[in-house]
Amino acid sequence: MAGQRGRTARPGAGYAEATRPGAGHVEAARSEAARPEPVRAEAAPAEAGRPGAGPAAEGPVVGPPRPPRGGPRPEYVRAFDASPPAAAPGPAAAPAPAAGPPRPPAPRSGDGDLPVPAPTGFVPPRRPGRLRLATGVFAALVTGALAVLVAGQASEGGAETPGTAERPPGERPPGVGSDPDPAGSAAPQAYEEKLGTLLPVAADLAGPGTFSAVPGRAEGPGRGETLTYRVDVEKGLGLDAELFARAVHTTINDERSWAHDGQRSFVRVDSGPVDFVMTLASPATTAEWCAKSGLDTTVDNVSCDSAATERIMINAYRWGQGAPTYGPDLIREYREMLINHEVGHRLGFGHVGCPEDGALASVMMQQTKTLTSGDRTCRPNAWPHPKG
């Protein structure tokens, strides 16, 4: 007792310095009935000069009980047999006065006008529970700090998409308008790109002379005269049959082609009666079928409409390599011209020459061979009605 007199109570001192200020007062009040003589100490003086500090506490502030030498008294042990309720995390409660009328609580330091909540009868934990209490307080502090950190990040920039924190600027996240699959496979070529690509086909290629029909049906514009056709591709060519079929159908139903102004509608089928068969074949097979109509395609390795048969023969060498009159940069336009020219023959149109120097060539001019007629040279043209 004598050793405690005159000591200055420091904020936070109490039950083994692990409990909140004021905990010793409640502890002594609980154990006072079990001891013959209460232990009392003088009121701790208020800290002078601290901004926002309230007046000194009225009544005694009781310090923590000290067990006598040789171990705690049985009465003291019995007084703490029951487990106290867990204290809710929150700000430290100010000590309550032991006597006298209640007075308004003093404001917390640094909080301005925010008052400290009134004490709620905090009961100090048993001595063996000090570590658990300290651990719980520490966990609550860590959880609160993490919550504040996460809230701050969300308010500054919103929640980040996983994996974006280390992404270089301008890089798109996976799945949001990203490139093709992560394995690196290239995206399928567009139709226009495929149609504008040269293909390696030998000028003396000879196929087996047998054909496969490209499966499926494709409708035309639905106006004017309806003509049906089938697309056959010679086996073993190694060329894209679907691309060829699409090019034929797209070209002849174009407004610049023979479907112009609703005159005709071409419908592709894969079986049954047809008006003609568009056939992609090797140079040797092309020559064989063209000869059936009295035409020789071997001189310039060209294509033909074998009018005595149902087949329009498109020479695979020309389809793959084009012609010098168009060059490699106009391979798409050459293929469109080739289709339109031979279908024009099937519709009854014959060959014409260059009408005027510098003019667009007629689609029925033999543009695979030349663009010149006499002293007139025309420009390449793939369409019967180039203005649409």
Image (cartoon, helix red, strand yellow):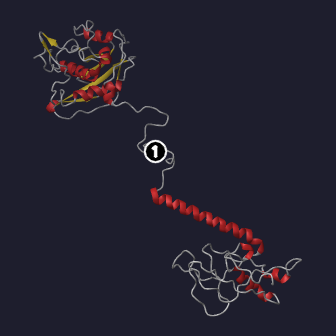
Identify the residue position indicated by label 1 in the image. 173
Could you tell me which residue is drawn at 25 percent across and 20 percent down?
A: 334
> In the image, is residue 287 above or below residue 69?
above
Outermost right residue: 70
**Direction from residue 109 to residue 240 in the image, left or right:** left
Outermost top residue: 299
Q: Residues within 10 Å of mark 1 (few under 14, many from 20)?
A: few
Could you tell me which residue is drawn at 29 percent across and 12 percent down?
A: 286
Q: Position of residue 262 (x, y in %)?
A: 15, 33
Quadrant position of residue 43: bottom right
> In the image, is residue 162 above or below residue 298?
below
Quadrant position of residue 68: bottom right
**Direction from residue 343 to residue 210 in the image, left or right:** right
> In the image, is residue 64 above or below residue 247?
below
**Direction from residue 17 to residue 208 in the image, left or right:** left
**Direction from residue 349 to residue 231 in the image, left or right:** right
Query: What amino acid is found at the position of numbered circle 1 in the picture?
Result: Pro
Quadrant position of residue 141: bottom right
> In the image, is residue 43 above or below residue 317?
below
State the SS at label 1.
loop
- Closer to the camera, 228 or 182? 182
- Closer to the camera, 154 or 387? 154
**Count of numbered tags:** 1
The quadrant of the picture occupied by the N terminus is bottom right
Could you tell me which residue is drawn at 15 percent across and 17 percent down?
A: 378
Q: Position of residue 208 (x, y in %)?
A: 38, 12
- Closer to the camera, 233 or 75? 75
The quadrant of the picture occupied by the C terminus is top left
Could you tell me which residue is drawn at 22 percent across and 27 percent down?
A: 252
Outermost left residue: 356
Outermost front residue: 49
Q: Position of residue 258 (x, y in %)?
A: 18, 26
